[in-house]
Amino acid sequence: MLFSLYFHIPFCVHRCAYCDFNTYAGQDSLLPAYVDALCREIEYIGCRLPVSAHRGGAGSGGGIHTIFFGGGTPSLLTPQQFEQVFRAIRKHFDPSDAETSLEANPGAVSLDYLRDLHSLGFNRISFGVQSFHPDELRQLERSHDPFDAFAALGWARRAGFDNLNLDLIYGLPQQLPDRWSASVRWAVDLAPEHLSLYALTLEHGTPFGRWAARGLLPVPDPDTAAQMYESAGDILEANGFQQYEISNWSRTGRQCQHNLQYWRNLPYLGLGAGAHGYAAGVRYSNVLRIRTYIDRMTSSTASLAFPFTPSTMNQRKVSARTRMQESLMLGLRLTDEGISNARFVEQYGLGIRDAFPDEVDDLLRLGLVEWASDSRPPVHLGSGLRLRLTPRARLVANQVFIRFVE
Ligand code: SF4
């Protein structure tokens, strides 16, 4: 069994007003201790890997499908700190074939830094560009400007990266559709292999959420946001990108393998403060605070069974029924692939419609899902029918997902 590894780096120079991720500003002095704690967590979990996770049997390195450093701002780690983490990884895992990604802020990288990352084994960078308009970036409280994004992309190419993603955000308060389309076109002109487009959500507890609740910030208009989503899809498809997930487009063969692991409901190990994981039939999450995480990983002597570590805060055993529901909710995000009925049978012993007859029939009748057949399915899917969202259901996908958990 191949795991994916997710490392959460919860450090930021500044907390953006819309962000509800588990991340903290002004704690950079804890970075060296945090990296030490991450290495301890790798060691802890690596020593307890089940035999089935070892590529060549017991004693060999655990196979890894992907490695992803997310945040926060992982690009605040120095190359030496990444090297320390990779040394710890290689002691227990074999990352030689893994897609290895880093999330980076465009304003926080240099050509030398990207060269170092490439030689350390990173092969994919995801840049949080968000917009190509300076005023929109200021509204989001991002610390970079559009020129940083142009420079970062150029440096990444010169450093040897041939797999780049750009994140963009739409549906900002008072954002005009034409300005959004201009950002999408700028992104296309930079020729990345992958684009992730996210609608702004006003999360409770963030400054944006509080300002909107007090009437100080106009709430994004959902109809305009829907129009932006559709126009972006048209631009991307006209430029050779294929949509493969509700919010993600890529060149052929350049889908994000790490996120596919999540959407295919396959196991991943989450390491770091606030990281989530799913392994051995359990969903779990780590303590949120950086200092608590460091303390737990440094001083605890508890001996816990895989996949837990002293930093585990919550855990939930996933029942067979819940696994089926989660497989549908995650798999339906994959706009083309959907969920293979044959694979579902292989995993759960019954077909999708046998497990959810009323839900599937209702959604088919409403035209929100469809059965697709594929004469050339990807190998892992097996053959036969796939259940997937219809194009018009992509804008109301949450309404579809809810049907499987009611
Ligand atoms: S840089 Fe990203 S993770 Fe950090 S506060 Fe801003 S949006 Fe959140």
Image (cartoon, rainbow, N blue to C red):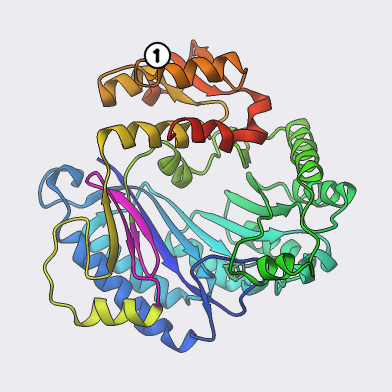
Residue highlighted by disc 1:
383
Quarter containing ligand 1?
A: bottom right
Residue 370: tell me if it is visible.
Answer: no
Q: Is residue 179 above or below residue 106?
A: above
Q: Quadrant of residue 47?
A: bottom left
Residue 260's x, y, as percent? 46, 40
Residue 8: tell me if it is visible.
Answer: yes
* Front in this rendered view, residue 193 or 129: 129
The boundaries of the magenta stretch are 270-289
- Give left or right: position of 187 versus 110: right
Q: Quadrant of residue 345?
A: top left
- Give left or right: position of 184 versus 113: right
Residue 173's x, y, as percent? 80, 59
Residue 203's x, y, as percent? 61, 61
Q: Is residue 293 above or below residue 86?
A: below
* Front in this rendered view, residue 104 or 140: 140
